[in-house]
Image (tube, rainbow, N blue to C red):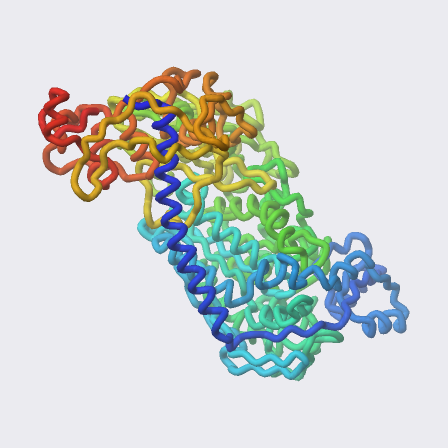
Amino acid sequence: MKSRLWQSFTALLLVGIALTLLIDADDQQAKASAAAASAAPSSQSAPSVIRPQVLVVRLYFKDKAERDRLAVEWGAAEVSTLGGYLTIWTDRAGYNKMLAQGLKASIDEQTTSQANNPNLFGQNSPDTFDGGYKTVEEMQTFLDQEVAAYPNLAEKVTIGQSWCEIHAPCNLPGPPNLNWNGYDLQVLHITNRSIPGPKPVFWLEGGMHVREIANPETAMSYIDYLLSNYNSNPDARWLVDYQDIWVMPIVNPDGHHMVEAGGNNPYSQRKNANYSNGCTTWPPGGGQLGTDLNRNFPFKWGLIGGSTAPCSEVYQGPSVNSDPETQAIVNKVSSLIPDQRGPNDPDPAPLTTTGVLEDMHSYGSLNLYPWGWTGSPAPNGADIANIGQHMSASNAYPPGNSYQSCQPPNCLYSVSGDSIDWAYGVLGIPAYTPEVSGNGFFPSYSYSQNTIWPENRGQLLYLAKIARTPYLTTRGPDTSNVATNPMTVTQGTPSNLSATINYAWSNNSYAQNVAAAEYYVDTPPWVGGTAIPMNGTFGGAQTVPVTATVDTSGLTVGRHILLVRGRGVNDYQGLHSWGPITAAFLDVLPNGGATPTPGPSNTPTLTNTPAPATSTPTSTPIPTATRTSTPLPATNTPLPATNTPVPPTNTPGGPTSTPVPTNTTAPTNTPGGPTNTPVVPTATPTDCPNPFVDISNNVFYYAIHYLYCRGVVNGTDPTHYSPAGTSTRAQFAKVVVLGFGESLYTPSGSQDFTDVPPSYWAYAYIETGFHNGILSGFDAANCTAHGATYPCYLP
């Protein structure tokens, strides 16, 4: 018999050792790769030259007509114009020209100071391209790393070539002098390829206007969130399993390379690198070379908001869809999403339209949607606007970004030939341009990670959730607070499923009373899953708590996902108003062990405050979806003494007969060696409540709580862990196997130990540990001494 304290901490230690070995190996490989990369000169390297001073100017207008004219003439930034002025990034000569023309203009001193801060991207700052924002090469390496870590869930797809790759080499005389060969246009395709389709498409793109440097980083954060949380977040799991998500972090890699050339002072390049149309101005200042890709798309091209002057920041290109970056997106998205709208401007797309597109820009704190060429609503305007309001609503689920939601002519300026008008105008899908927050094009890297990404995570998840039928699904309610309690049960033991169905989020045009809720086990409704009704007081409120008792007697051992959704009292065109799904995990263990006590749930909590990621050990992990270099979350738990005896293992030389101690002194992290003095925790883990009243002042509080929250250990009753009690070798087997996240193994032939029959509650854990070389039995002498027949485990 072993101490329950020793049991808990040894399991945590074993997991830590295993991960540390993997992390060390990855670190050594990464360091070697980095050393090799730094030793070799890059053919794409960009010299750093201090750029001319930038002035950020407020240019005032009298009416919308003057606003739209000045926006084209001066290349206005994508910042709200409801204050009566455009925001223009220019130089001293440009500002003087405004005044000479009799225009009312003033310098925004705060933003100008920030834009010219030499320390913002200085060599001693963590926000350099080397230490923070990624170069194009680093973005492409990031995509390769994600594919290597999650080969069954992610693939890198090249959809075209940049202008400079087609016309290589690109030569820009300076200073700085640039010479590079262009880049492939790369997209990361995220979906579980072992689950067949067809699947609905969510397309996300960033980095079209490349001085808006935070947007590629946000797109990469979204990629990493979906993949790294696949095993621990139930919504990430079902989105990757059943949706077709395409993320293009950098639409305009040539332009980004030009921005990088500023080094500590990034250049304010907006457009691509096409210098074949009569403008060769480099570096950008009083004009710039290139085509504005977001004026080049093949819908209403050249109508409004674009310029025919090649040096203009909003130069629309020599012809519609003329540039390779635009062509690549049009061709790829059109191959993924069918044309679902008629040819005429008033033609609406059907209520069952599938697919969503987002084109991320900065920095106006706006959620823009079609139409951009007119202030009148689009034919599907009510649904498009409602999705936009959900993207904004901080009290929706997932929570919105709190930006203003609007059509460009009504809050920014009129525009045509842009990607979202093309996506809706041609394909009929809802499409959005979040103008993310930040007081300028070059926010600090820490701001992009700690503010912009958390602000926009919820709206990105929502658009992916509704991609199957966005116009219909936005008419349904949100589902939040989904939880199973307990999350881990033995087969046949029921679990309580709870959730909240909610229409009452801000500015919801379809708010109505909740009519019903249902859940599905593992298989969603669109692939034939069976709906199981949930209980609630329906028909009289816009927010309804719902519950169900989940019968696990027919569920297989392993991890299951419960998919919950609700609907309203109104139907539309004969279709129920089911809202988007939110999910929870349920882990089912074999019969025979102690029934887990109610406690932790597994509801992913989404807020706009960044939080450290957690991982949940499961009984059926998917190795290809596990990043092997992810470290174990840090705790303040002390390491056990190194001279503590360990149970027998399959080490070279065969099983050992070392007896397991029954009284092991619990070590602490107090200098001078082990002590029995309790250590009061200095912090409380926040991933689940602590139900045990007898561990608060215990030295192993963190280890016990960590393992309990992940379903590895239970209490002796609902409120007691009994840390001074003992545990058996069978219980230890369960802790170690679950701690390592091993898939449960059942022998194809007879049992391996005479004293562990298949009917024994810990049979699967002991066999799994034995066949993975983690545990072993005793030798013949010890089996005989304990009255057992060799081979024995002595559980």
The correct choice, above or below, for 161 with respect to 555 in the image is: below
Is residue 175 something one can see in this rendering?
A: yes
Where residue 7 appears, as percent x and y from the top left, is 34, 28
Q: In which quarter of the image is residue 786?
A: top left
- Name the quarter where the C terminus is drawn: top left
Where does the image place residue 249, in percent across and percent down from the top left? 53, 60
At 14% from the left and 25% from the top, the residue drawn is 755
Quadrant for the N terminus in the image? top left
- Foreground residue among 534 and 679: 679
Instruction: Answer with left or right where residue 390 lies relative to residue 410.
Output: left
Which residue occupies 14% across, 26% down?
782
Q: Is residue 730 above or below residue 454?
A: above
Residue in the foreground of this view, choosing between 269 and 307: 269
Horizontal and vertical percent for residue 734?
29, 30
Q: Which of 307 and 738 is in front in this view?
A: 738
Q: Residue furthest front?
A: 672
Name the spot of residue 14 as percent of width and height, x first.
Answer: 35, 38
Question: Residue placed at 32% from the left, 34% from the top?
Answer: 738
Asked which quadrant contains residue 789, the reply is top left
Report the number of numbered marks: 0
304 lies left or right of 26? right
Tell whether 636 sits left or right of 508.
Answer: left
Q: Which residue is drawn at 56% across and 44% down?
A: 458
**Relative to residue 773, is residue 109 depicted above or below?**
below
Residue 601 visible in image? no
Foreground pick, 618 / 189: 618
